[in-house]
Image: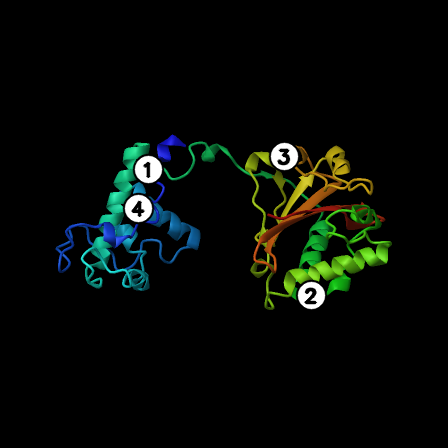
Amino acid sequence: MNRWQGLTNWWRNLLDFDLILDIPAEAPEDKEAIPAFPRAGKHKLTEAVYDFLNAAFVENMAGQAVAYVADEAYACYEPQGVSDGKPLNRGIAPFLARKRIEATSAQLHKALGEITDLRPKDSSSKEFKSAKAPPELIEAMTRFHRDWFVKRYYPGELKYLSIEAFECRKLYLQKGKAPPADMDEFLERWREGMQQVVQHRGLVKTLAEAIHAVTLSADQLAVVPHPEQDAFTIFALSDELGEEARCSASVSAPPEIGDELLRQDAGGDYYAAAFEAVTAGGNPATLITLWRKIDGAWKIYSYRIDTP
């Protein structure tokens, strides 16, 4: 962590024109022309962001990086002006942005040494372990999430909650509220909770608009590829650890689903789905549902809710 000392505000200052000295009245002749269109401007967002950072801090081609800065971005600095208190000259704004990127890059290289790659050094050796899951499980999980967030059809979703999930009734209780007395009340609490999660959002057409997959470290899990993997993650549990993840009606704390439950040799009878959504209060919350086959159908037998 010491290598970052003194760089706390480097990103905030990336385009801070107040820190640029000797501001010219007009743009000088530019030896490194700033392209009219960024190199990866038509690529995916992740590729464009990577190219921006790579050009700025690896290739030391600040001009290429500035090509990603839209004219609208320079308006953010007009209320502040520059060091002499005069409004920012839009004609020299790209030049100033390039100078600031060059200065920031120099700071990073001074603190970290030569930067040859933005990725972690060992990232090339890490790959997500892949696992397979029965197609009917993937379909059940997908219907569960779509019924909740897209269709908002709660009877359709509640059918995936098994009687075994009733063991979790003492978990996540509001202060002063008694546990559900029976399965009907348990399902009603679930329905109320599901409505609360979506009521502050507008209608969506796709799952990925409403929820986001939970990203976990590659060495912790075996991920099941599926069509809605941008919206929720499916991963496998070993049989032994799948059993340990059950709720117990006698406990007062949620079952822990930590790293030890995410083994690479997992897969077979127990799976989990995980997603993150923003609650009505604006805070993110993660829901992990655990699934197994019960009476011939894939259902939820346990779950965990993580909130800030």
Q: Amino acid at mark 3?
A: Asp
Q: Separation of disc 4 and disc 2 at Cα? A: 45 Å
Tell me the residue at 38%/58% (across/down): 42
Q: Residues within 10 Å of mark 3 (few under 14, many from 20)?
A: few
Q: Nearer the viewer, mark 4 or mark 2?
A: 2
**Residue 183 shown left or right of residue 255 in the figure:** right
Q: Nearer the viewer, mark 2 or mark 1?
A: 1
Q: Earlier in the sequence, mark 2 or mark 3?
A: 2
Circles 4 and 2: CB atoms closer than 8 Å: no
Q: Amino acid at mark 1?
A: Gly
Residue that numbered label 1 is attached to: 6
Q: Which disc number belongs to residue 152?
A: 2
Circles 4 and 1: CB atoms closer than 8 Å: no
Q: Residues within 10 Å of mark 1 (few under 14, many from 20)?
A: few
Q: Amino acid at mark 4?
A: Ala
**Residue 89 shown left or right of residue 226 in the figure:** left
Q: Where in the figure is residue 276, as x and y percent of width and height?
A: 60, 51
Q: Separation of disc 4 and disc 3 at Cα? A: 36 Å
Question: For this rendering, which residue is in front, 280 or 66?
Answer: 280
Q: Separation of disc 3 and disc 1 at Cα? A: 34 Å
Q: Earlier in the sequence, mark 3 or mark 1?
A: 1
Q: Earlier in the sequence, mark 4 or mark 2?
A: 4
Q: Separation of disc 4 and disc 1 at Cα? A: 23 Å
Q: Which disc number belongs to residue 259?
A: 3
Element type where label 2 sits in the image = loop
